[in-house]
Image (cartoon, coloured by chain):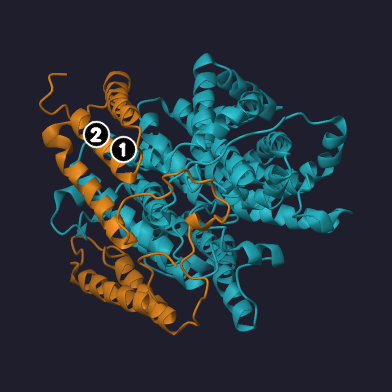
Amino acid sequence: METLSHIGYGFGIAFSPESLLFVLIGVLAGTVIGILPGLGPMSAIALMIPIAFGMDPTTAIIMLAGVYYGAIFGGSTSSILLNAPGVAGTVATSFDGYPMARQGRAGKALAIAAIASFVGGTVGVALLMLIAPVLARFAVSFGPAEYFALMVLGLTAVVSLGGKNLVKGLIAAVVGVMISLIGIDSQTATPRFTFDLPELYEGVEFLIVALGVFALAEVLAMLARRGAGGADGTVSSLRLTRRDLARIAPATGRGSVLGFFTGVLPGAGATVASFLSYSAEKRIAKDGHTFGTGNPKGVAAPESANNAAAVGSFVPLLTLGVPGSGTTAILLGALLVLGVQPGPLMLTDRPDVFWGVVASMYVGNIVLLVLNLPLIPVFAKVLKTPKAVLLPLVVVFCVVGVYGLSFSVFDLWLLLGFGVVGYLMRQNGFPAAPLILGLILGGMMERSMRQALQISSGDWTVLVTSPVAAVLLALAALAVVGPLIARVRGGRGGAADGTEGKHDRDTDTADRR
Amino acid sequence: MGPFRFSDRTLAVAIGLFAAGYLVLAFDLPDFTAVQVPVQPATLPRWLGAVLLLLAVLLFFQRRDPEAGVGADSAPTATTASPGPDARLGRIGDTRLELALFAASIAVYIALLEPVGFLISTAVYLAGATAYLGYRRHWVTGLLSVGVAAGLYFLMSDFLNVALPPGPLPF
């Protein structure tokens, strides 16, 4: 009953004209950015954060949430039309979506993607409403030791699922934590790794790193590929028959539920959810052998899963204050800058933000369907933007975003530096998501560790004597050691099944959510 | 194979050197003695440096990964786009040089942002980079460059109260 009144309150916020306007802006901007190959939700959110700074926290996070699932939906458009997924979470969509497009059924594939995304998002929001308050009540009892363990788990889970090379993932995460320690130590006022530069006293702003290693690095990668042309974005009829809908309904339902629960797990996120859903559907379906040749179920399953997972990934963010993915890490950074501390107390302290975001997700889903379905042919034209125009534009947006944050040219040099580092990372197989997660979680991890040790008068066993912390740390150890053992025993490491193994190359790292 | 791709061993040596340097700096951090604290400012950095060194060693001795160096950009591009007649970005054959030049152009843009102001530097950068990369409709380039620079400038300053550097211009 109490939850229902909260939900009503949330919808009151979500349906205010201002919220509706910003959901609309967020979804539109997210879709356009998500369509561009390589620019996924992380880049989209990072590019939109400067605009969010001038808003009130509720409106800002509502807009950024809109950007998030708009970007995921946009990614499916380029997956289907180009076989070039805009985001990793839509790679699985291209397996059947692109063959459908080649058979002249691009419009149908896009319509299925839109409807499956809508159902996935809706189921995800319904489950979020049920699960989040329960989890938050449980998490209120968490002390610093449990939080420390939870953050370690979040970091290792993202690393272990973040690509084939575990060592490189761990290196990225460690470097991320290192960057988070730059600046004046809040507890002892000791400057650490500042090289006597006043600009570094307050640390390195996460947005600079995020824009550098994602957006700017992607610009350099596009340039290195040297292809200049835009794409052909022609779309056929979007009409779906009742028979089409009946055919994809079971796959969509299963994908939604599976996707949500995968999304809740730290580190799993939309990419893993979409692959799991695709391969599960391939096994279940009577016509599983036709997957990969343009089967609509092969579009519905991953699309419903990745949107449900995107919603699911908000559960640990909003209830525990711990992001389980690179994208939610960026959202967390934005929330902190806006003065909102997500966590178990957010439900009581800032119910407007919490329920406003949840209700807005639902509204955003409706907006996605109503707005994007008729606009698909228009969005497809974004693909025609010549790279020669697109690349400098993205650079300018990055520069405006960073300068608008701190008014410091020094930060722009850092941006360029991180752009180069991000490019070198992706060229050499280092995933970028663990770096961002390490950067966001590093400071919090150290703070939790210190608080725990302060309480225990310096007794380190406090980190493992609490049952919850011990279980979380054991899971973290398993996340790192498991793939290593699998590899030693002759497993190839990384892939959960054949499909994923084969396409591992494409499920990048940068957009691991 | 793209440019700037190195073997895991080369990377491991570079990361190892970085970790060693980081450790030196971490051990140089002074201890905090005013009151007793269970975790010194140098505790976590020292651990991190040691862990990174260990990971560099692991990377050096790990089996070669034939798939190394695959990033977000590696989405299946076999079918990407039907390139137009100007199907090549940039003008220099050597991609490494092209990347360095592009990075240098961003550096010049950053350096001129405050002295010249956002409007002029952005319009010039957009026009220059777009034309250099091979977009041939110069009218469109000119309009787009000025339009985007002015649009962003007034959006940021008038609506979001973010003051971008005006440079010598009076507004």
Front residue of A416/A104: it is A104
Within-10-Å neighbours for mark 1: few <14, some 14–19, many 20+: many
* Quadrant of residue A319 within the rendered picture: top right
Q: How many marks?
A: 2
Q: Identify by letter the chain in cyan.
A: A
Q: Is residue A79 left or right of residue A296?
A: left
Res. A396 mark = 1
Q: Dot 1 lies on which element?
A: helix
- Chain B, hue in figure: orange
* Residue B168, position as x, y percentages in the image: 10, 26
Q: Amino acid at mark 1?
A: Val
Quadrant assignment for the N terminus of chain A: top right
Residue farthest to the front, as pictured: B85
* Residue B111, position as x, y percentages in the image: 16, 43
In whole angstroms, how far apart are the C-alphas of marks 1 and 2? 7 Å
* Tags 1 and 2 both on a single chain: no
Q: Chain of mark 2?
A: B
In this rendering, is residue A89 above or below A177? above
Q: Chain of mark 1?
A: A
- Could you tell me if the residues under marks 1 and 2 are in contact, i.e. CB atoms within 8 Å? yes
Q: Residue at x 47, y 70 (%)?
A: A461
Q: Amino acid at mark 2?
A: Thr
Front residue of A131/A174: it is A174
Q: Residue at x 56, y 75 (%)?
A: A481
Query: Can you see residue A344?
Result: no
Q: Is residue B111 left or right of residue A426?
A: left
In this rendering, is residue A380 above or below B72? above
- The residue identified by callout 2 is B122
* Residue A380, position as x, y percentages in the image: 57, 34
Residue farthest to the top, as pictured: A17
